[in-house]
Image: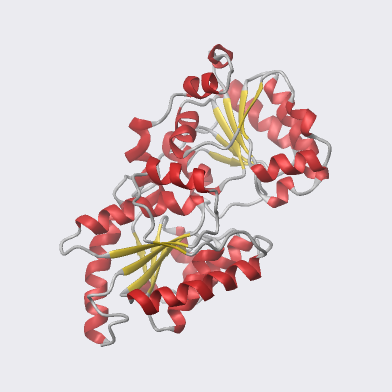
Amino acid sequence: MSTETGAGAPILCVVGARPNYMKMAPIIRAFAVQHPRLPTLLVHTGQHYDAAMNDRLFADLDLPAPDVNLGVGSASHAVQTAEVMKRFEPIIDQHGARAVLVVGDVNSTLACALVAAKRDIPVIHVEAGLRSYDRRMPEEINRVLTDQLADLLYTTERSAHDNLAREGLPAERAVFVGNVMIDSLLASLPRAVPPGNLLREAGLDPRIIGDGYGVVTLHRPSNVDRAEVLGPLLEALREVACRLPLILALHPRTRNNLERFGLLGGLDAPGLLVLPPQGYLEMLGLMSRAVMVLTDSGGMQEETTALGVPCLTIRENTERPITVEQGTNTLVGIDPQALLAGVDDILTRGGKRGRVPELWDGRAAERIAAHLAGWLDQHERLS
């Protein structure tokens, strides 16, 4: 057997963007305590490259510093994907790879999966089978193609298996293990930063949120790159803030577009508390004590469901349908009136409380480590 894929080589674990860190942290820990231990090499592609925020998130999640940073940085989807591929392949040559493990649906996920598949190295995809069925989302393209390349597909919900079957993938490749995002959430919750601390640090009076507050994040291009969408959404948020204080963690892309469209002044509204982007423990503290969350984030749909906090998702679709069917999530689209109606329902009737989905119990990474150890041994015996 080639040393490239032999049992002595590490599993290359790839992260590229902030949501990947929450998924990878419990996996790295579970691999380290698996018997026999599963050696890893943590590769950061640098797709998100805010050094200060990266360091903060790694520390928050107790995730070791990357063994390799490819330093790719920002670019168009095509250039970024190609650059990750160019820089990732020499890492395989240098260190070998027993397998390549990728998480989620960012460009780095697809790029590294493609390199591994062409080198006949097993591809392991964590969070497989999720579908929005909206090909306008770049993440949807990444999800579909990565699943087609993967040898082993770990899923967060049973509906993912139906999606994979419709796309012709053999059932034996897919294993339902639960949600590693929730592993990180449950492990980190005791260390979550109280909201009052954040407000004090920002020079705001914590008494403003004494009777409750909502949390807002907006960053998806479909919501923030067009003035005709972003403007009405901002007006709706201003109206909500008259009834319930809103803490808005403002994404740099959103801030830049508000300035470009001449809408930045709209943030100056009573009850609208604007903070810079926050670390993981800070956001966890904000969400866990909120009356509601208004977001277009995929991960926050899952986190609010696990926390039992009503969530209004400002999107027309979701790749995480279980958060709607079983959890606390409601899709309101980009119609400001639908958003306001959803807010009214939560304020007057409490909104959706739902239940925590199956196997969202904080042990998904343990199940992955136990299964993968046996799978790799069998795969190598048959190779």
Residue 241 drawn above or below residue 68: above
Q: Nearer the viewer, residue 102 or 331?
A: 102
Q: How is the image coloured?
A: secondary structure
Does 10 sit left or right of 125 as displayed?
left
On the image, the x and y values in percent for residue 88 come to: 47, 72
Q: Nearer the viewer, residue 295 or 19?
A: 19
The residue that appears at 62% across and 27% down in the rendered structure is 345
Quadrant occupied by the N terminus: bottom left
The residue lying at 50 percent from left, 72 percent from top is 87
Q: Position of residue 154 (x, y in %)?
A: 38, 63
Between 242 and 55, the residue placed more toward the observer is 55
Residue depicted at 27% across the width and 67% down the height:
372
> From the image, which quarter does the C terminus lie in?
bottom left
- Taking depth in this image into account, of 189 and 291 the one nearest to the observer is 189
> Is residue 150 visible in the rendered structure shown here?
yes
Examine the image and state in which quarter residue 269 appears.
top right
Q: How many marks?
A: 0
Outermost residue to the left: 35
Q: Where does the image place residue 382, in percent across and percent down from the top left?
A: 25, 86
Q: Is residue 215 left or right of residue 90?
A: right
The answer to whether residue 179 of the structure is visible from this angle is no
As drawn, 283 above or below 199: below
User: Percent from the top left, x then y, of residue 84?
Assistant: 53, 69
Q: Is residue 39 left or right of residue 208?
A: left
